[in-house]
Image (cartoon, rainbow, N blue to C red):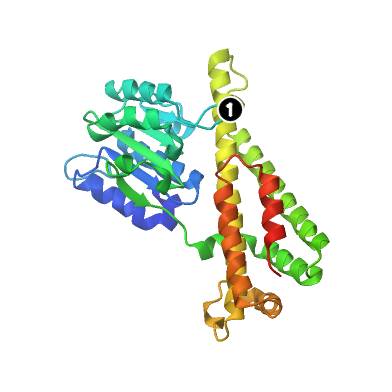
Amino acid sequence: MSVYELEEKEKTVKYFKNLLHSDRLPHSLLLYGGNVEKLETAAKYLAKILNCENPPVKGETGGNLECCDSCSSCRRIQEETYPDVYWIRPESKLRQITVDSIRELIREIQLKPLEGKWKVAVIVAADRMHQNAANAFLKTLEEPPAHSLIILITIEPHRLLPTILSRCQKINLTESDIQQINQFKDFLQQIASLILGSGKEVLGRYKLLDLLVQKLNEIRDGVEQNISSGSPEKRFKNVEIDSQVLEKWQKEAKSLIESEYRRQRQELFKAVQWLFRDIWLQTIKDSQQLLALPELADYTSKIANKITPEDAKLNLEIFEDCQRLFFTNVQEMLILEVTLLRLQF
């Protein structure tokens, strides 16, 4: 991926270049935002720059400022097969990054680069580090070897230990909420229409539950198809692979699917919260200019006429509770059912 494919993140690209140009690249970076794929793309982009064999642009001190995206190093970094770029993702049913994985990373980062100029370690979903793993990681994070870079990726930086956060230079790649909800406008209209048509009937709540479940199943199917199609197991299906390596790839793919599904579920429910925010604003007169979804104003105003501002505010709190419960061991279906039955409309 060349710099031109990161147009939407021009400031980040410029920031990378400024760090490289001034030889101020930190040894540990935290990339955070709402999209894991884009965060991984940014990490790969930086790893390519550092290890590109034919960089089109170099700085005054001779360091790379851009990647060619076509040399052997760039291609293998993209495919995650380059020996000097080490990836860690959550494993096991608990989707945790174990202390054994971190110890392996520590050993790896201490070694000199085999082919490139830089050793790069990327920890995807760094917030899933077990506390023992995080503690084992602290010293290496604080004092990594020369010509090494540790990149932490997360969509939930607030779940990282403060001791981890304080040792990383942070780059925010978060898209605005308004940009994110655009993809769900049609679905939000379906929700609003169903609420208007169902009134306070319990059956209407279960119709809404069915609509949400269908959407979540659609999201999960899309995530599984997307990640499975680009997995190492699929890319090297015609190559004989060691059974332990294959099992590791399968576990990583499963963990990545679950992580990406949860991220997209979070985006969906954040969009639904914006819909209910607009309903609350409609209960407070003269707030039209603050609506996030003005295209749905006819729906939100009609729903608002049926409830009080207090009920509308309570609905927002209910959805906040729902988002928190998603991070517990409570079953997803039970969370959805209880949430919808509690709503006031």
Question: In the rendered view, does 245 fall on the left or right side of 296?
Answer: left
Q: Residue at x 19, y 43 (%)?
A: 23
| Residue sitting at the far bottom | 286
Res 277 quadrant in image:
bottom right
The crowd level at tag 1 (other Cα within 10 Å; few <14, some 14-19, many 20+) is few
Would you place residue 47 above or below residue 342 in this image?
above
Would you place residue 96 above or below residue 41 in this image?
above
Residue 212 is at least partly visible in this image: yes
**Which sits in the foreground, 270 or 181?**
270
**Quadrant containing the N terminus in the rendered view:** top left
Residue 293 is at least partly visible in this image: no
Q: Position of residue 32 (x, y in %)?
A: 41, 48
Question: In the rendered view, does 320 fall on the left or right side of 81?
Answer: right
Question: In the rendered view, does 190 fall on the left or right side of 294?
Answer: right
What amino acid is labelled 1 in the image?
A: Arg
Q: Position of residue 103 (x, y in %)?
A: 36, 22
Q: Position of residue 72 (x, y in %)?
A: 41, 29
Query: What residue would you read off at disc 1?
Result: 235
Instruction: Identify the secondary structure beneath mark 1.
Output: helix
